[in-house]
Amino acid sequence: MSQKLTRAEWEAKARALDLHTQAFIDGAYVDAASGKTFDCISPIDGLSRGRVAECEAEDVERAVRAARRAFESGAWSESSPAHRKRTLQKFALLIEKHAEELALLESIDMGKPVGDALAIDVSASVRCLNWTAEAIDKVYGEIAPTPQHELGLITREPLGVVGAIVPWNFPLLMAAWKFAPALATGNSVILKPSEKSPLSAIRIAELAMEAGIPAGVFNVLPGFGKGAGEPLALHMDVDGLVFTGSTGVGKHLLQCAGRSNMKRAYMECGGKSPNVVFADAPDLQAAAEAAAIGIFFNQGEVCTAASRLLVERSIKDEFVAMVVEAGKYLHPKHPFEPGAPMGAIVDEGQMNRVLDYIEKGKAEGARLALGGERVMTETGGYYVAPTVFDEVAHEMTISKEEIFGPVLSVIAFDDEKDAVRIANDTDYGLAAGVWTSNLSKAHRVAKKLRAGSVWVNYWDGGDMTAPFGGFKQSGNGRDKSLHAFEKYTELKATWINLRS
């Protein structure tokens, strides 16, 4: 996927976009039943790009009816795995064909550099669809060990209607992690994108139809959590609910599942990930650059952001200076600028939240070593400088709470035991990093870290072949890999008496 366009060329393409802003229900774009719309504000400049359909309970009802009807018809749910594979591969090709358009929608909607959206978000979404499609006709059932007169079959069947509520930080990719395995296993899907970033989800609904996914199987409901997300979570005819977002909302959705029909509910929630650097790290410069990118990539709006940097005390001052120097080169720019390392914070509310945490860090005694302010105010957009706090006490607010912005907290530790204690002393358990040249130490620490992903001597590894998810209040269930299929299927045991 090429990303060699100039800012002027991206701006010209942005002006030429024909934005889809309606809901997509039962194979067609439709207005919200109430006729309500909401402003689609771009964080790049604070300006509206149009009005988007604001779906509510009546629209959820329409989508669920369509999804259930499509599921019961068997047109998709009973089609062969090979057929679903070919269709999803065509879907992936169409997303790739429209890569620049989708990257622009991501950038306009939530402020990330368009180069990142193209090279990472769209590319990984295509990879997700292709990998999942290729895997689905290679997932076998089982035969139980039984006496000679019995045959025990263990099979997987689709849940039925799946509601997928996805976040604004990687709008297309997080959606793909949900709808790809859900569709591959034969379910109907109702996708509720964040009200902060609905455009790419709305656009790909049309591409799904073009790929051959039957009407009603893939629906998209833009809207707010209270108006659309909660009715979807409470609906008695939704069989599965999957979510990526904050831990608070995840807990509420689990309650909705319990209050309704005990629908299968899987939550991928927040993180406050520790990046542990020992004095014997193989390359301190590489570790420092990775530490900076690990928190400042995507403006820090990443659930696995390396927001807590734990550094062995003997090298702490030297290492922090290296991280600060690396951070100076990651200053935000206009998202259409080639090579922009950071873009805009998703909206004014999130920007103010990040700035409030920065003020708390100062007030509680942390030393501000870099950044700490809003920048590029002349654009009208929402930009925050890369920020590093040194001398952070583990008990400080900025060390405990997920900020979801470009704010790094540096914490010193004395030895291996101390590092593990601090790293694990959190409500979250999504990801962690370890930097050491000692192989035994790497294994010991990685084993003791309570996190769903642990990276040794780099940050943010993995691909579609490995599961993604967290421990503790970072959620349950796993995205990616063959394990993702467990979220979208029911296990059935069928026993046959061979004596008759």
Image (cartoon, grey):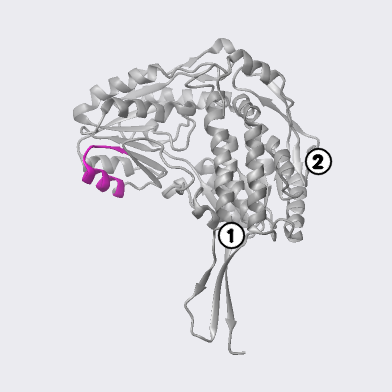
Please state the horizontal and vertical placement of residue 157, each as a whole percent of the image: 62, 63
Res. 394 in view:
yes
According to the picture, the residue beneath numbered tag 2 turns out to be 33
221 left or right, relative to 276: right
Foreground: 74 or 86? 86
**Residue range highlighted in magenta:** 434-447
Secondary structure beneath dot 1 equals: strand
Task: Tell me the quarter of the image containing the N terminus.
Answer: top right
Q: Label 1 vs label 2: CA separation? A: 32 Å
Secondary structure beneath dot 2 equals: loop
- Residue 440 counted in the magenta span: yes
Hey, what amino acid is under mark 1?
Thr
Please state the horizontal and vertical placement of residue 324, each as a whole percent of the image: 34, 20
Magenta segment main secondary structure: helix
Hey, what amino acid is under mark 2?
Ala
260 left or right, relative to 482: right
According to the picture, the residue beneath numbered tag 1 turns out to be 489
Circles 1 and 2: CB atoms closer than 8 Å? no
Residue at 64 percent across and 56 percent down: it is: 82
Res. 169 in view:
no
Please state the horizontal and vertical placement of residue 301, each as a whole percent of the image: 49, 31
Examine the image and state in which quarter residue 406 appears: top left
Foreground: 65 or 210? 210
Foreground: 430 or 90? 90
**How many tags in the picture?**
2
Residue at 54 percent across and 63 percent down: it is: 140
Q: Residues within 10 Å of mark 2 (few under 14, many from 20)?
A: some
* 1 or 2: tag closer to the N-terminus: 2
Examine the image and state in which quarter residue 122 appears: top right
Q: Is residue 332 above or below residue 453?
A: above
Q: Residues within 10 Å of mark 1 (few under 14, many from 20)?
A: many
- Residue 441 counted in the magenta span: yes
